Amino acid sequence: MKKITCKFLIRSAALLLINAGINIYYISNPNWYTAISTSVSVPLGLAIIEYALRDKEESF
């Protein structure tokens, strides 16, 4: 579980930096809500899938 949490935090930080950079570069008024929601929701979905697959693999 600790490994999944670390991956989640790293992915969130990376996506936040990428989204914020793209927003600042292309849009004069960046949309921070979109950058933050994307940087949390995508890694959260990946973490849930990874946890479910790992749990299923251990019980298999």
Image (spheres, rainbow, N blue to C red):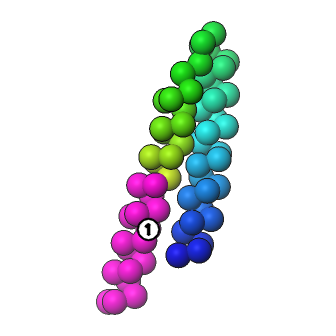
> Up-down: is 24 above or below 10?
above
Query: At numbered mark 1, what does the secondary structure look like: helix, strand or loop?
Result: helix
Q: Which region of the structure is painted magenta?
A: 44-60
Picture residue at 34% right of the left edge, 89% below the top: 59
Task: Based on the picture, tell me whether residue 32 belongs to the magenta stretch.
Answer: no
> Up-down: is 25 above or below 42?
above
Q: Which residue is mark 1?
A: 50
> Up-down: is 54 above or below 40?
below
Q: Furthest residue to the top?
A: 28
Picture residue at 40% right of the left edge, 63% below the top: 48
Residue 24 picture quarter: top right
Residue 55: x %, y % from top left: 38, 80
Task: Based on the picture, tell me whether residue 57 belongs to the magenta stretch.
Answer: yes
Picture residue at 61% right of the left edge, 39% below the top: 16
Residue 8: x %, y % from top left: 56, 58
Residue 57: x %, y % from top left: 38, 83
Query: Magenta stretch mostly in which secondary structure?
Result: helix
Residue 19 picture quarter: top right
Residue 58 picture quarter: bottom left
Residue 52: x %, y % from top left: 36, 72
In the picture provided, is 23 more to the left or to the right than 34? Answer: right
Q: Residues within 10 Å of mark 1 (few under 14, many from 20)?
A: some
Numbered disc total: 1
Picture residue at 59% right of the left edge, 49% below the top: 12
Q: Furthest residue to the front?
A: 33
Q: Hey, what amino acid is under mark 1?
A: Glu
Question: Which quarter of the rendered picture does the C terminus lie within?
Answer: bottom left
In the picture provided, is 20 more to the left or to the right than 51? Answer: right
